[in-house]
Image (spheres, rainbow, N blue to C red):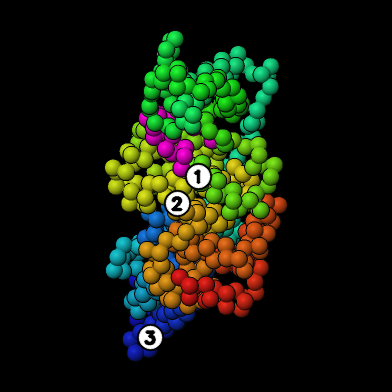
């Protein structure tokens, strides 16, 4: 056979010997590169599975299905999706490279069969980029591809280590989304206040004074009231009662009055944090009942109702967790509450705060600002966006309990506390009777536990509100409570091991071995 130019090539059965050799060379090269890429694809699938395991959960859709109940941290979910998407992109790129090598192998075989080269940019079946086909260049191409695949693999594994080390997939939101409680002094001497701060303090004291009773009256021998004198003359006194919270005034003949005396020392002290809080929201009304300071844009009656709910929560919380709350922290920290009547302003505060709270719901705790933010329960109750998450009062108590965890120093701020622990204590306090288990969810929870079979599977597979509630109820049992409290005390010393998965961290909180924990867990499940 003659090629253009006059040279002769020997053939066997009509095929070029050189062409046959080229077929075997290119086929071997394509097979080698293809196997390497296939190995890379398998490796990335393995990495993807490893990420799922590092995330300590089942596929993202399972957790997202409960997002409305749990209000999982938005940054946590974004990072999980980002890690997963990165792996999928790597898989797609490697599969594309494998297909490209297969097409080049087909191209080389066609060229060898024809005994002369195809144009370098010709199409086999689809348009292809220009890739050199001589053996030396092809080897270089394969080496480059191998280096890139290795680089991608290293990058994905680095990402896995980041996820595991920061605990983003299992137990805690990213540290960057949460900040430690601001170091704002609780108090300052008056001589250290700026003129503006001093003016605000006087205004707060005057406003609070107008809400307080000034006198106590006793009449008809055993009827006592505290309130204010509206009018008085020689024959009678018109008195407005303030002790019951209801607007009621009575006119009493002086002959019936046994005692009428002024009251003093009732005004709560105005702290420096109160002053700075009011300077942020100068137009809002102030209400103060130790240990809470509330700024309120809603009705006065609504503010008093929310304040009463939080005072009851505080009393129950202190009683239930008193042995694990540092005495010095509980005594010195005031608790701030922002009660808003405007939904737009409420949502703006939520976006700005980067706090723990739910992704929806009528209240949230902002660790960044160390404050509880509440939407007027009456307004929230008319909007399904808020009521579909949980009853409004339950959300307020849940987020109020999270505020107490940090403000009272029971749990460390920043990233030192697992998310299952904080959310769990929150939902543990949702019911009006602190710690009461919500029986309406018990069948659903028992079905889940039955599917998981073991405690370890249950702890790895879930992270929603039902899971957190069940775990805290389990840990608050008398048999393991002391170990659980000791674990929370250890967390305050910065001893949290971020490399632990959710199941291992909960096991650590019980102080039990794997077998003991499983036995205790199964005994607890039987009581649900």
Query: Badge 3: how crowded within 10 Å, few (<14), some, or many (20+)?
Result: few
Question: Do the numbered discs 1 and 2 sit on residues whose CB atoms are within 8 Å?
Answer: yes
Tell me how far mark 1 sits from mark 2, CA to CA: 9 Å
> Does label 1 or label 2 sit earlier along the sequence?
1
378 is higher (above) or lower (below) than 135: above
Residue 197 in percent (x, y) is at 58, 18
Disc 3 marks which residue? Answer: 11
Task: Tell me the magenta residue range.
Answer: 292-309
Q: Residue at x 39, y 59 (%)?
A: 66
- What is the number of callouts on the image? 3
Question: Do the numbered discs 2 and 3 sit on residues whose CB atoms are within 8 Å?
Answer: no
Q: Secondary structure at mark 2?
A: loop
Q: Quadrant of residue 116?
A: bottom left
> Does label 3 or label 1 sit earlier along the sequence?
3
Q: Nearer the viewer, residue 180 or 177?
A: 180
Tell me how far mark 3 sits from mark 1, CA to CA: 98 Å
Q: Nearer the viewer, residue 51 or 264?
A: 264
């Amino acid at each position: 056979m003659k090629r253009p130019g006059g040279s002769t090539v020997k053939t066997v059965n009509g095929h070029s010997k050189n062409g046959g050799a080229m077929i075997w060379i290119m086929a071997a090269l394509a097979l080698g590169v293809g196997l390497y890429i296939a190995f890379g694809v398998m490796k990335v699938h393995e990495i993807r599975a490893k990420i799922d395991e590092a995330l300590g959960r089942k596929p993202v859709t399972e957790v997202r299905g409960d997002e409305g109940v749990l209000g999982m941290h938005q940054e946590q979910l974004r990072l999980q999706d980002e890690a997963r998407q990165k792996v999928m992109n790597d898989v797609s790129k490697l599969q594309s490279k494998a297909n490209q090598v297969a097409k080049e192998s087909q191209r080389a075989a066609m060229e060898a069969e024809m005994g002369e080269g195809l144009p370098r940019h010709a199409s086999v079946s689809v348009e292809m980029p220009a890739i050199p086909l001589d053996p030396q260049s092809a080897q270089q191409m394969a080496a480059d591809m191998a280096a890139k695949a290795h680089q991608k693999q290293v990058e994905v594994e680095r990402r896995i280590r980041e996820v595991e080390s920061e605990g983003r997939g299992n137990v805690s939101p990213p540290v960057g989304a949460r900040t430690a409680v601001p170091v704002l002094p609780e108090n300052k001497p008056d001589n250290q206040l700026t003129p503006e701060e001093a003016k605000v303090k006087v205004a707060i004291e005057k406003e609070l004074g107008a809400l307080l009773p000034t006198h106590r009256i006793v009449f008809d021998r055993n009827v006592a009231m505290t309130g204010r004198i509206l009018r008085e003359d020689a024959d009678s006194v018109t008195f407005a009662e303030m002790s019951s919270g209801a607007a009621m005034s009575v006119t009493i003949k002086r002959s019936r009055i046994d005692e009428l005396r002024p009251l003093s020392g009732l005004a709560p002290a105005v702290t420096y944090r109160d002053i700075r809080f009011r300077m942020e929201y100068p137009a809002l009304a102030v209400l103060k009942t130790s240990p809470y300071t509330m700024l309120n844009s809603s009705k006065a009656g609504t503010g008093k109702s929310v304040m009463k709910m939080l005072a009851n929560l505080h009393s129950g919380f202190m009683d239930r967790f008193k042995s694990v709350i540092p005495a010095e922290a509980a005594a010195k920290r005031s608790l701030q509450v922002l009660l808003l009547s405007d939904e737009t302003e409420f949502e703006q505060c939520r976006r700005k705060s980067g706090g723990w709270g739910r992704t929806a719901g009528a209240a949230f705790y902002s660790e960044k600002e160390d404050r509880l933010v509440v939407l007027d329960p009456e307004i929230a109750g008319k909007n399904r966006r808020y009521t579909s998450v949980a009853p409004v009062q339950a959300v307020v108590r849940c987020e109020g309990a999270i505020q107490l965890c940090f403000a009272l120093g029971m749990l460390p701020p920043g990233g030192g506390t697992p998310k299952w622990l904080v959310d769990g204590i929150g939902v543990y306090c949702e019911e009006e009777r602190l710690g009461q288990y919500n029986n309406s969810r018990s069948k659903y929870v028992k079905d889940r536990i039955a599917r998981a079979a073991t405690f370890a599977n249950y702890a790895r597979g879930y992270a929603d509100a039902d899971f957190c509630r069940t775990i805290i109820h389990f840990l608050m049992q008398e048999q393991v409570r002391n170990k659980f409290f000791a674990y929370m005390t250890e967390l305050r010393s910065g001893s949290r091991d971020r490399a632990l998965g959710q199941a291992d961290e909960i096991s650590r909180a019980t102080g039990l071995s794997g077998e003991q924990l499983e036995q205790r867990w199964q005994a607890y499940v039987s009581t649900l």
